[in-house]
């Protein structure tokens, strides 16, 4: 559901406010020349810059929409146990909702330099990742396949498993020697030798129980985070009311941001679109250079959104409103 919430954020006079420098916090260190020349982080000194924003704003084309509602996806594929619905295609990420029939198995495959990851909406699936014990994942679990590690999936429930999966955009998988590659027009599969390995660290785990995380008092945990791929489980607390419509949040240069509602309910304000409401399983997208502000839906408890962006580890520039006192995230 997309709600015209009084403000449809589009180019116009509202975006041309006179910038007011944000004062430094009381007691903060006085800025020095090039104080911002430091390792990438998001809590550096505030400064006003000129940023390029497309005019008109980046359109939604092809697969991409402001929101894909899971209810509409399930309705469109009603009566079929196996199906594949593309829902996201950016410069970096190719996201699909997939249904696998009871007993159905995927081929084993891996991606050379980037991760595949996903989240289980319903049903049960056994996920086997190189170097890990096979694990049966049910509703609410997420998985993270490190580069160079092959993975396979098999439905083990009596009902189809429905899952959201992301792979690197524009990249074809590789396969173990004992697997049969899927033919792709314009490509020839040939045998090659590799010596590269893959694995996990303190910021990356192969499996994560999102529902248990949401039901607990834990905060700030990560399950997937590297130099290219970020799928941050962003937890927002319950709120009594939405921020004012004059609070636009932020935007990214040359980078779209997508969210999967994996727990609770979301409200996302997107410039040029308005207020987008998300239920569990919905996929929401803010295209490149579009302002966006995400919160829990008021008075429905906390929410968790799987925020999908690139280049987070080195630090992403969040372009905030220049006007002092503007809120948002």
Image (spheres, rainbow, N blue to C red):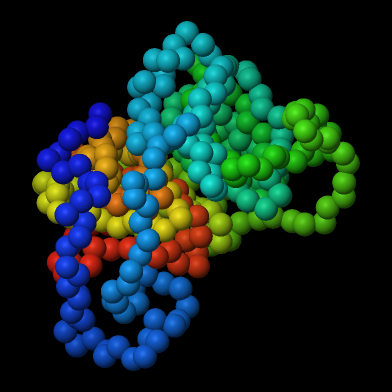
Q: Tell me what residue is drawn at x 33 percent, y 91 percent.
A: 32
User: Between 303 and 282, which is closer to the camera in this rendering?
Assistant: 282
- Residue under the point 31% across and 79% down: 45
Residue 281 can be seen, yes or no:
no
- Provide residue 326's location: percent of width, then percent of height: 17, 62
- Residue visible at 40% across and 65% down in the picture: 317
Percent across and percent down for residue 27 are 19, 88
Q: Residue 174: give x, y in percent of width and height.
A: 75, 41
How many marks the image carries: the answer is 0
Residue extending farthest to the top is 79
Q: Quadrant of the N terminus?
A: top left
Q: Which one is in front, 150 or 319? A: 319
In x, y percent, where is residue 30?
A: 26, 90
Residue lying at 44% horizontally and 83% vertically, measured from the top left: 37
Instruction: Examine the image and state in which quarter residue 24 appears.
Output: bottom left
147 or 328: which is nearer to us? 328
Q: Quadrant of residue 258?
A: top left
On screen, residue 202 versus residue 10, left or right, reads right
């Amino acid at each position: 559901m997309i709600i015209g919430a009084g403000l449809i954020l589009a180019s116009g006079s509202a975006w041309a406010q006179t910038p007011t420098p944000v004062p430094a916090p009381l007691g903060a260190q006085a800025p020095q020349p090039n104080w911002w020349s430091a390792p990438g982080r998001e809590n550096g000194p505030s400064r006003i810059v000129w940023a390029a924003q497309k005019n008109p704003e980046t359109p939604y084309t092809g697969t991409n929409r402001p929101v894909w509602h899971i209810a509409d996806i399930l309705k469109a594929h009603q009566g079929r146990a196996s199906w594949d619905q593309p829902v996201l295609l950016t410069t970096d990420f190719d996201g699909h909702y997939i249904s696998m029939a009871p007993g159905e198995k995927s081929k084993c495959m891996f991606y050379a330099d980037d991760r595949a990851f996903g989240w289980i909406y319903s049903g049960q699936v056994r996920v086997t990742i190189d170097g890990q014990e096979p694990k049966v994942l049910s509703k609410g679990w997420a998985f993270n396949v490190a580069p160079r590690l092959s993975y396979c999936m098999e439905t083990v429930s009596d009902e189809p498993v429905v899952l959201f999966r992301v792979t690197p955009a524009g990249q074809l998988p590789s396969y173990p020697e004992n697997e049969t590659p899927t033919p792709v027009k314009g490509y020839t599969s040939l045998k090659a030798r590799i010596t590269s390995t893959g694995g996990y660290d303190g910021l990356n785990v192969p499996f994560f129980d999102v529902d248990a995380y949401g039901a607990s008092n834990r905060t700030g945990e990560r399950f997937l985070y590297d130099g290219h791929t970020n799928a941050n489980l962003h937890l927002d607390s319950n709120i009594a009311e939405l921020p004012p419509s004059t609070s636009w949040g932020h935007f990214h240069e040359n980078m779209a941001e997508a969210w999967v509602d994996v727990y609770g309910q979301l409200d996302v304000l997107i410039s040029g679109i308005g207020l987008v409401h998300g239920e569990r399983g919905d996929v929401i997208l803010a295209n490149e250079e579009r302002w966006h502000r995400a919160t829990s839906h008021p008075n429905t408890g906390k929410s968790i959104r799987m925020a999908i962006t690139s280049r987070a580890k080195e630090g992403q520039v969040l372009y905030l409103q220049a006007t002092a006192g503007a809120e948002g995230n």
